Amino acid sequence: INPDTVKAYVNRGSVRGDLGDEVGAIDDYSEAIQNDPSFAQAYANRCLSRSNIEDYQGAIADCTQAIGLKPNSVRAYQNRGHARRQLGDSLGALEDFNIAINLDPDDPDPYFNRGLARLELGDRIGAIDDYTEAINRKPDHALAYYERGLARAETDDHLGAIADFRTSGKLCLDAGRQGCYEDAQYHITQIHQQEIPTSSEPSPSFDPLE
């Protein structure tokens, strides 16, 4: 095993993934794994790339392998939780996000994703709490404000929802993301018209999570 070769494949895979070439990234991670089947990062990265092409079963298998090799891998639990959510296993996702939070309480992403899972399980208050925790750790988290706005609207906290949508819209506008700004404005208009949105899914205009 040449460690430099393995790392080179993983690094190139990461670059390919960043450029949107998930299939190429998967090929590189697979080469890394073939050279060193015990390299946990290659499995964790391939898990994310597989999720990005909606191969959620493959993603779960890879993340589970990564966790077996490196039980304290926050990324692996986070990515497996995301894949489980996409397959409708909100409870399994919740368990993975709980572990990720215990391993790294300062990371905003597991809180945000646990909020999504909690909302799917009917726990609106818990979801709002998690979005708040994500915002506390990343104050410019536009999507966390957006999702908290949706959850607050569902609990009839219209003023809180409007405040969140306004903040989300401003952050989107500051980042040059016109689409998500317009989405936030749309929900503000809906609340003013007493047509409260019920969807808890992020708008397609929002960038996918990494």
Image (cartoon, rainbow, N blue to C red):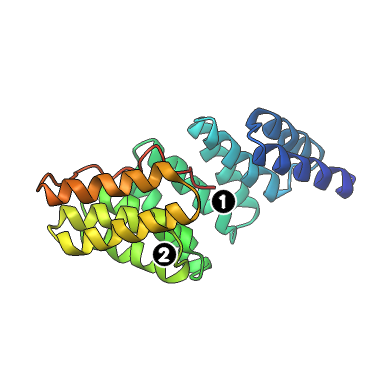
Residue 106 versus residue 7 in the image, above or below:
below
Q: Residue farthest to the left?
A: 194
Task: Check contact, mark 2 vs mark 1: CB within 8 A.
Answer: no
Q: Which amino acid does label 1 sit on?
A: Ala
- 131 sits left or right of 11 in the view: left
Q: Where is residue 200 in the image (x, y as percent from the top left)?
A: 27, 45
Residue 114 seen: no
Mark 2 packing: few (<14 Cα in 10 Å), some, or many (20+)? Answer: many
Rendered image quadrant of residue 45: top right
**Of helix, strand and loop, which one carries label 1?**
helix
Tell me the distance, in whole angstroms, between the alpha carbons under discs 2 and 1: 19 Å
Q: Where is residue 36 in the image (x, y as percent from the top left)?
A: 79, 43
- Which residue has dot 1 on it? 76
Residue 27 seen: yes
Residue at the (68%, 49%) spot, across then down: 40
Residue 26 versus residue 209 in the image, above or below:
above
Q: Nearer the viewer, residue 64 or 145?
A: 145
- 154 sits left or right of 13 in the view: left
**Of helix, strand and loop, which one carries label 2?**
helix
- 49 sits left or right of 124 in the view: right
Mark 1 packing: few (<14 Cα in 10 Å), some, or many (20+)? Answer: many
- Which residue has dot 2 on it? 134
Q: Nearer the viewer, residue 69 or 99?
A: 99
Q: Position of residue 111 (x, y in %)?
A: 41, 61
Q: Which amino acid does label 2 sit on?
A: Ala
The quadrant in which the N terminus is found is top right
Residue at the (26%, 63%) spot, across then down: 163
Which of pointers 2 and 1 lies earlier in the amino acid sequence?
1
Residue at the (39%, 35%) spot, across then down: 87
Residue 118 versus residue 86 in the image, above or below:
below
